[in-house]
Image (cartoon, rainbow, N blue to C red):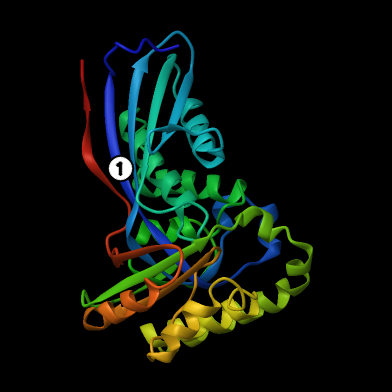
């Protein structure tokens, strides 16, 4: 066990944006392949709020680690554990790794928190441990963690890329293809987080499995439509239709959705969470805030992140 008073031998910090998926398609034939060749097609956008991860490496007698999420010991960080243990297998000397996740986004609302935790952690570990991976290789480890832990399929490649995007072929970073759509800085996102959903449990739902083929066909069709007309309005319309097929518009998000519709603002539901979102021009933001502030939930207003995951502080040795 690491001695608390001991100085770390290296420190690194990285950031990954959160992400909202509006629609997607999967392919079950890819499940037998390495996770880097699995993934999803779809459309979505990265948001200006996300996960910042600080990694501190200490000399120790055994290989071990700890994980904090917003200052609290995290006992259910399966994705982070996967990433850490992968990196520990790459180093020979016994070390203790301290991981501190600082999340600006709530967990379980379809905002890509698992992917952003894995991606920011992989970037930070790669540099703190001097494993000399490329950014693509580090991102592939995060993608593998997300797929294996059943917390996401297309989240990591989207957060790796940043911006408003269409995932046009299957696979993780460096393998899957992403079409990045230019978006003006005059747009921003408003997200009302009402109630979390367990993504892994939802995807194992037997009733949903019966509709899976139809939803995958619909998702593929929507990728084609958005490629033909790559606009915010088209994306929101397609996302709205997809969320409705999942039955997400008839529940917790119904009333705020109808309220925005009454002022001619298009919106949809993040996949997967009871979180209503819209992308609007800044001159329309205040009326959106007035409407959504009347409902229970956490309201997030943020920019569209266009740069993707990155190191914040360059790693440095303390000894």
Quadrant position of residue 252: bottom right
Identify the residue position indicated by label 1 in the image: 14
Whole-percent x and y of residue 118? 45, 44
- Decide which of 42, 282 is in the foreground and name it: 282
| Quadrant where the image shows the C terminus | top left
Q: Residue at the location (37% across, 90% down)? A: 263
Secondary structure beneath disc 1? strand
Extreme residue in the front direction: 294
- Left/right of residue 58 with respect to residue 78 in the rendered view: left
Image height check: is 49 above or below 274?
above
Q: How many marks?
A: 1
Q: State the residue in front, 237 or 259.
A: 259
Q: Position of residue 132 (x, y in %)?
A: 34, 35
Q: Is residue 111 visible?
A: yes
Q: Report whether residue 230 is seen.
A: no
Where, quadrant-wise, is the N terminus in this rendering? top left
Eyeballing the image, is 16 above or below 232? above
Q: Is residue 273 left or right of residue 311?
A: right
Q: In this picture, is 44 found above or below 227?
A: above
């Amino acid at each position: 066990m690491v001695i608390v008073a001991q100085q770390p031998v290296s420190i690194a910090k990285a950031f990954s944006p959160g992400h909202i998926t509006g629609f997607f398609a999967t392919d079950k034939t890819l499940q037998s392949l390495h996770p880097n060749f699995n993934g999803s097609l779809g459309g979505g956008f990265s948001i200006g709020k996300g996960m910042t991860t600080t990694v501190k490496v200490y000399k120790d007698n055994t290989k071990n680690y700890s994980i904090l999420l917003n200052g609290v010991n995290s006992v259910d960080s399966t994705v982070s554990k996967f990433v850490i243990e992968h990196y520990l297998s790459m180093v020979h000397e016994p070390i203790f790794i301290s991981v501190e996740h600082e999340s600006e986004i709530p967990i379980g609302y379809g905002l890509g928190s698992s992917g952003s935790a894995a991606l920011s952690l992989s970037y930070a570990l790669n540099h703190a441990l001097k494993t000399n991976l490329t950014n693509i290789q580090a991102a592939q480890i995060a993608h593998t963690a997300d797929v294996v832990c059943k917390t996401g399929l297309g989240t990591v490649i989207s957060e790796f890329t940043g911006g408003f995007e269409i995932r046009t072929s299957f696979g993780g970073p460096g393998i899957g293809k992403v079409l990045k759509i230019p978006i003006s800085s005059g747009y921003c996102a408003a997200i009302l987080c009402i109630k979390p959903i367990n993504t892994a449990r939802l995807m194992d739902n037997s009733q949903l499995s019966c509709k899976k083929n139809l939803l995958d066909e619909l998702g593929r069709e929507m990728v084609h439509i958005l490629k033909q007309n790559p606009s915010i309005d088209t994306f929101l319309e397609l996302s709205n239709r997809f969320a409705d097929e999942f039955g997400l518009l008839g529940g917790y998000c119904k009333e705020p959705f109808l309220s925005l519709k009454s002022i001619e603002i298009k919106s949809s539901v993040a996949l997967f969470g009871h979180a209503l979102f819209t992308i609007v021009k800044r001159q329309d933001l205040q009326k959106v805030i007035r409407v959504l502030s009347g409902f229970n939930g956490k309201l997030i207003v943020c920019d569209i992140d266009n740069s993707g995951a990155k190191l914040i502080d360059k790693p440095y040795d303390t000894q």
